[in-house]
Image (cartoon, rainbow, N blue to C red):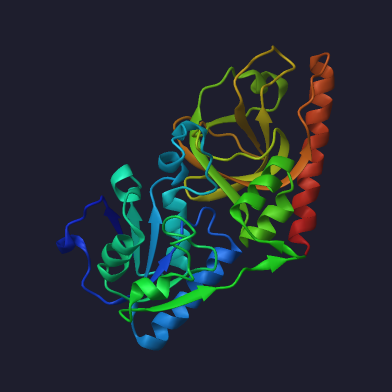
Amino acid sequence: MEIIEIHHPYDPNEIPKDEVVMTLGFFDGVHRGHQEVIKRARKEADERQLKLAVMTFNQHPSIVFQKINPDTVKYLTTIEQKAQIMSDLGVDFLYVVEFTSAFAGLSPKDFVDEYIVGLHAKVAVAGFDYTYGKKEVASMEHLPGYANHRFDVISVDQLSENNLKISSSRIRVYLDEGKMSLVSEMLAYDYVTGGIVVHGDARGRTLGFPTANVKTASSVHLPKDGVYVVEIKVADTWYKGMAQIGHNITFEANRDRTVEVYILDFDQDIYGEQVEVKWHHYLRGEIKFDGIDGLVAQLNQDKQQTVLYFKEREGL
C-alpha cells in the first residue's frame, strides 16, 4: 500500500494517475463499521478492475472547525495503526490529508472537484452519515448531484449490534467504562496502544513486581484507570502481563497518570524500547492501600487472575 500525504492545495503531479474507487471517512479506530465500508469499496474496485483508495485526515476536523485544543483530542488509532489495518484490508492508496483551515474552507463542490474527481475516482464510497461540509448541503444524499455523472456514489448503511450503532464514540464510552470485551467486539480486534519505555521510580522492583513504565502520547485514548490483563509487544514478540493505568495513589497524592506493565516470566532491560500494549480484560480499579503488605498481596492476586485468564483464553 502506498501512503500519500496531501497538503492543500496539492500538486496534481504528486497524485497517482490510476483510476480508483475512493473511500471517504476519518476512520478513527477502523472499527467493524468502517471495515464494512472499506470491504464494500474493495469489492467494487475488484469488479471494475480499479485501484482502491482511502482518504483520511491527519487530525480530527473538530480541531479546526470548533477551534479546540489539539491536546484535548483523544484518538483510538494513530495514522500508523490505521495504515496497517487498511493495508490488511487490501487498500492500494492511503491519502492522508492535512486538515487545515484552507482545506476546511473548501465548498462542497470544490471538495468534490479537487478531492474526488481530482484524485481520479470513478466511484465514491462512504458511510451513510459521511459529510464533507455542512450536513444541510454536503451529505451523502447531495453527493450524486455534485458528482454530475462524473463518478458513481455508494452509500453504506449503518452497521449495528444489539440495536446499537457501531461507532467510534461508543467505543470511547466502553473504554471509559473498562468494558474491553465490548471494545474488541466493535473493533473486531483487541485494542492496542503504543509508547516508549522510560525510567520510573523503580518501586515495583523492590516489591517483586518490576514494571515497564510506558510513556504514552497524550493524544491516545487510554481505558479507564485500573488494573488490566494485557500483552506487551517488545521487539516483535508478544509477552503476557498485567498493567495498571493510574496515579500510584498508595505512595503519594497528585502523581501523574502512568501506564505500568508487569510482564510475566520476563527479566530484560527494555528502557528506550518502543512497545505496544494490547488491552484484554479489566480486573479492578485503582486502590489506595494502607501499607506495602496489602499492596503486594493484591498484586499476587492480580497475577493469579491474569494467569488464569490466559489459560482460559487459550483453552477456548
Res 232 quadrant in image: top right
Say if 51 sits above or below 277 in the image. Answer: below
Let me know if residue 16 appears in the view.
Answer: yes
Taking the view exactly as shown, the residue that stands out farthest to the top is 252
Q: Nearer the viewer, residue 232 or 37?
A: 37
Residue 143 location, x and y as percent?
A: 42, 71
Residue 164 location, x and y as percent?
A: 72, 61
Q: Nearer the viewer, residue 305 or 174?
A: 174
Q: Who's the residue at 56% across and 21% down the image?
A: 200
Q: Who's the residue at 78% across and 40% down the image?
A: 283
Res 21 quadrant in image: bottom left
Q: Image check: 103 left or right of 70?
A: left
Q: Count the marks: how many? A: 0
Say if 26 sits above or below 144 in the image. Answer: above
Q: Who's the residue at 43% across and 35% down the image?
A: 67
Let me know if residue 52 appears in the view.
Answer: no
Quarter containing the N terminus: bottom left
Say if 39 sits above or below 24 in the image. Answer: below
Residue 119 location, x and y as percent?
A: 27, 68
Q: Who's the residue at 66% across and 22% down the image?
A: 247
Residue 269 location, x and y as percent?
A: 51, 31
Quarter containing the C terminus: bottom right
Taking the view exactly as shown, the residue that stands out farthest to the bottom is 47
Q: Image check: 49 left or right of 280?
A: left
